[in-house]
Amino acid sequence: SGDVNIFACGGITSQNIESLLTVTGVNSYVMTGKKEKESPMRYRKNGFGTGLFKKEEYKLWYTDAQEIAKVRAILNFAK
């Protein structure tokens, strides 16, 4: 059809989505809702890594469903 859709992505949260919508006018978003938590791994041998960067060695990344729901609610309200 020749239409071009522009998606905003990267660092989108419930804290900034309203500003993005207002300032940019973009109405299509891609987000992970990514949060970080400490790994439950108990045994951690000094000097032996898992192959990841040291500062993130024992962190787990996950999608926060509540964060996604907050953003959806904000976007639904804005329609």
Image: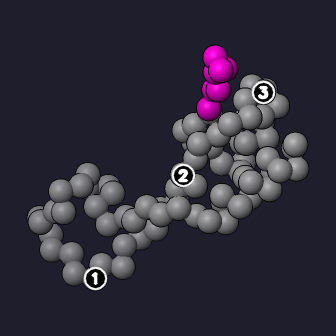
Residue 42: x %, y % from top left: 28, 82
Mark 1 burial class by Cα count in 10 Å: few <14, some 14-19, many 20+: few
Could you say whether the residue bearing mark 1 is in a helix, strand or loop? Answer: loop
Q: Residue furthest left?
A: 47
Looking at the rendered structure, the secondary structure element under dot 2 is loop
Residue 32 image label: 2
Give the residue displayed 71% in from the left and 42% down from the top: 16
Q: Amino acid at mark 3?
A: Gly
> Which of the numbered marks, if any, corresponds to residue 25?
3
Q: CA distance from mark 1 to mark 3?
A: 47 Å
* Residue occupying image coordinates x 32% and y 66%: 58
Q: CA distance from mark 2 to mark 3?
A: 21 Å
Give the quarter of the image for residue 2.
Answer: top right
Q: Out of 74 and 60, give the one closest to the viewer.
A: 74
Circle 2: is it few (<14), some (14-19), or many (20+) Cα within 10 Å?
some
Q: Quadrant of residue 9?
A: top right
Q: Which residues are magenta?
A: 1-7
Pick out the residue farthest to the front. Answer: 1
Which residue carries the number 1 mark?
42
User: Closer to the N terminus: mark 1 or mark 3?
Assistant: 3
Q: What secondary structure characterizes most of the magenta part?
A: loop
